[in-house]
Image (cartoon, rainbow, N blue to C red):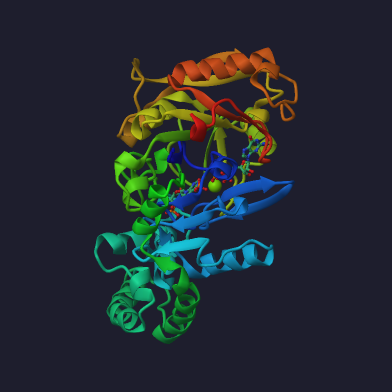
Amino acid sequence: MANIVIIGTQWGDEGKGKVVDLLAEHADVVIRFQGGNNAGHTMVVDGEQFISHLVPSGILQGKTCVIGNGLVVDPEVLIEELDYLAENGIDVGPDKIKISEKAHVIMPYHKAVDHAREKMKGDKKIGTTGRGIGPCYEDKATRRGIRFVELTDPELFLEKLTPILDEKNFYLKNYLSADTLEQEPIIDAYTRHAERLAPHVTNVSVAVCNAAKEGGQLLFEGAQGTHLDIDHGTYPFVTSSNTVAGNACCGTGIGPTNISGVIGIVKAYTTRVGQGPFPSELFDAVGDRIQKVGAEFGATTGRRRRCGWLDTVIVRNSVRLNGLTGVAITKLDVLGGLDGLKICTGYRVSGDTMSDFPASLKVLGACEPIYETLPGWSEDISEIRSFGELPENTRNYLNRVEELLETPIDIISVGPGRDETIVLKNPFTR
Ligand code: GDP
Ligand code: IMO
Ligand code: MG
């Protein structure tokens, strides 16, 4: 039996959705453990694309999908996703979709505060997705959040909502100069959401542990990426949850001894949406080409993703922070046709070489990437299904990346489709 965690090693959008969808074939339960609908995970099956924001990417494989306690959930978005999946003939009944009673609920005031704060910050903004993620985690930490267990109990819901809405309205009006919110429409909408979602709400820790005890294999689906982690990322240009593999335990309610492997998803180049440092960012025609060929637009907000060369300083940081047992390289096809491929192997700052990722954004801002250049390839590799058939320069590129990361490449993705993949080692059958 194997229980595997999938995480992003860069700044999100590495292709986690594709790899989770692919590996879910071998899993019984697929679990999201952090984040919310700031995530946008794309699956492409038989030429059809589905972008999931909350429902785990195992749903198209018909697996039990779990939303752990570590998430912040916008019930309206979740209901929209469930409706869409049901319309497309996918079973999303309470046996298939489970929501932790301890997951926190994103309220309209969280979204209002997120927007108003970003507006107020002007060019100092974080570039959030505007989904209310930060303000909801903030209320969780300050112990005034509303969880599903309260949402689904009308008396408790009202008891919690009234004082907090008062406070939020004061803050919205007097500090953020934003519109205030009325209580009645919130109660109406959230009562409907609660009724609709109540059958799915359960003790996820018990459900997941029982599934594992009965011999089921678990697949944990991370959202965002390691460098958006609230502790380990490029703070404050991060999201508000722990995105690293260790949080699969906290965000689900299982112990660390249950995890048998961690696969880090590595895009063959680097992208970032929103503000924040990005040492290997490209501002030239090569960056534009990668952005175009890779169709690098945010799956949640539609924003153009910033693009740059593969940075192995950040991926090595992820190897350590997540205890990676293997990596999946995605979007390798996008690099085809480029003359020379650069890989960032270290940073130079004030004449010194630095191989570890600095905590200070001031230091990071002063870092010059050190590159080595490998020859590119011109062949279309999207039809290739074995390592040996890849062009020699592609194999050399992969071998060098593996060497720099000191971690085996288990999966190579050469296109968005589920089948456009070369699996060298299936983590579930290791
Ligand atoms: P996630 O947030 O990590 O799940 O990634 P996103 O879904 O936001 O972004 C990844 C994008 O790349 C999606 O549009 C995928 O369909 C696409 N994609 C994934 N793997 C590959 C690949 O190997 N090649 C190409 N060309 N596209 C890919
Ligand atoms: P997936 O799971 C890429 C970024 C936002 C912003 C910062 C904070 O699809 O990889 P937030 O709304 O979370 O407070 O925004 O984090 N961000 C992501 N970037 N992929 C994601 O998710 C992201 N989720 C949040 O752009 O810079
Ligand atoms: Mg995404």
User: For residue 379, which quarter of the picture?
Assistant: top right
Considering only vertical position in the picture, is 314 above or below 183?
above
- Residue 114 screen position, x and y as percent: 41, 62
The answer to whether 363 appears left or right of 374 in the picture is left
* Residue drawn at (34%, 42%) of the image: 258
Residue in the image at 55% along x and 41% along y:
26
Front residue of 394/257: it is: 257
Q: Where ligand 1 lies, by quadrant?
A: top right
Please identify the quarter of the rendering in which residue 377 is found. Answer: top right
Q: How many marks?
A: 0
Check the image and name the residue furthest to the front: 214
Residue 269 shows in this picture: no
Q: Position of residue 44 (x, y in %)?
A: 67, 46
For image coordinates 37% across by 43% down, the residue present is 229
- The percent position of residue 324, horizontal first and vertical second, equals 41, 30
Q: Quadrant of the N terminus?
A: top left
User: Which residue: 61% across, 46% down?
Assistant: 297
* Residue that lies at the very extreme toward the bottom in this rendered image: 184
Above or below, comparing residue 327 to residue 119 in the picture: above
- Residue 62 seen in the figure: yes
Rendered image quadrant of residue 323 = top left
In the image, residue 16 above or below residue 184: above
Residue located farthest toward the left when viewing the structure as drawn: 142
**Vertically, is 318 above or below 133?**
above
Viewer-nearest residue: 339 or 133: 133
Residue 355 place in picture, x, y as percent: 36, 20
